[in-house]
Image (cartoon, grey):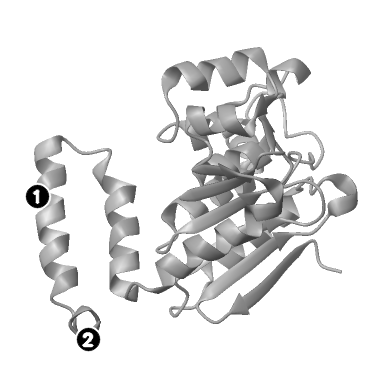
Amino acid sequence: MPDVLTKQNGPILDIILNRPDRGNGADDAMAIELTRQIEGASEEIKCIVLRGAGADFCTGRVAAGPPPTGPGNAFATRAFFDPVFNCYGAIRNSPVPVIAVVQGRALGFGCAIAAVADITLASDQASFQVPEMAHNILPTMVMSSFIDRIPRKAFTYLVYSTALISAERALGFGIASDVVPAAKLEDAVAQVTAAILKAPLPAIRGVKEYARHAFNMHPDSAVDFARNIHALINSSAEMRRA
């Protein structure tokens, strides 16, 4: 059975991390496959739903051996970690929203992809943690996923304390978008995806593009960008037919 499962349900692409016996701990091959599936989604896809099989979402990254060390290996060491950074980038740069569905633990890499997703729906039984500092690992990979997602106080608390936080606290920190009873998690996913699917594809892509860029702009530039993309998208044939 593949470690990453995919299924296209009409305009929805479901991606499932499929190592339930290991908490869906992800090695580099899984990160590479996740990146490939997101970047290779067909033009008809309106949203991507990312899940973990079994009790957990993802309990972290499974190291692929030690990175290159020693003088002259800086670029090789940097490239060694590219599968993780590229995975975050694929979620961030997907032209359609990525929805993370967190039913259990989301630790390290799992916490990062939950944070970087456009929408994160969490069960009230979910928990989140950045445990790297407790294992003498500088957690800048996870931190890079947080940089435009959560406030600085939450950012530094999670990293330095290595605290395991509840779904409600993750909601307050900006990692989760909504928290629902465990029995209602799939209902929440269905409601959000149904709302997205009602919109024409140009509008779905336009919202993602604006959200991806506008928060890094000066307010005046963000307003100009809004005016331009508003005129462009709303003049498309798909929007006129909607």
Quarter of the figure that contains the C terminus: bottom left
Q: What residue is shown with label 2? A: 241
Callout in the foreground (1, 2): 2
Which residue shows up at 64% across the image and 53% down it?
A: 185
Rendered view: 216 above or below 237: above
Mark 1 or mark 2: which comes first in sequence?
A: 1
Q: Nearer the viewer, residue 3 or 176?
A: 176
| Residue 37 disc label | none
In this view, 131 is above or below 41: above
Q: Is residue 130 above or below residue 87?
A: above
x and y percentages locating residue 100 in the rendered image: 58, 52
Instruction: Give the side of residue 195 with respect to residue 237, left or right.
Output: right
Name the residue nearer the viewer: 150 or 125.
125
Task: Kindly tell me whether residue 103 is visible in this rendering.
Answer: yes
**Residue 196 sits in which quadrant?**
bottom left
Q: Is residue 224 left or right of residue 241?
A: left
Q: Is residue 194 above or below residue 145?
A: below
- Mark 1–mark 2 distance (CA, rounded to whole Å): 26 Å
Crowdedness near tag 2: few (<14), some (14–19) or many (≥20) residues, C-alpha within 10 Å: few
Residue 130 visible (yes or no): no
Q: Quadrant of the N terminus?
A: bottom right
Q: Are marks 1 and 2 in contact (CB under 8 Å)?
A: no
Label 2: state its secondary structure.
helix
Instruction: Indicate the amino acid at tag 2.
Output: Arg
Residue wearing tag 1: 224
| Numbered disc total | 2
- Residue type at mark 1 is Asp
Q: Position of residue 239 (x, y in %)?
A: 22, 78
Where is residue 25, by image quadrant? top right
Residue 62: image location, x then y, percent? 79, 41
- Residue 193: percent from left, percent from top: 49, 65
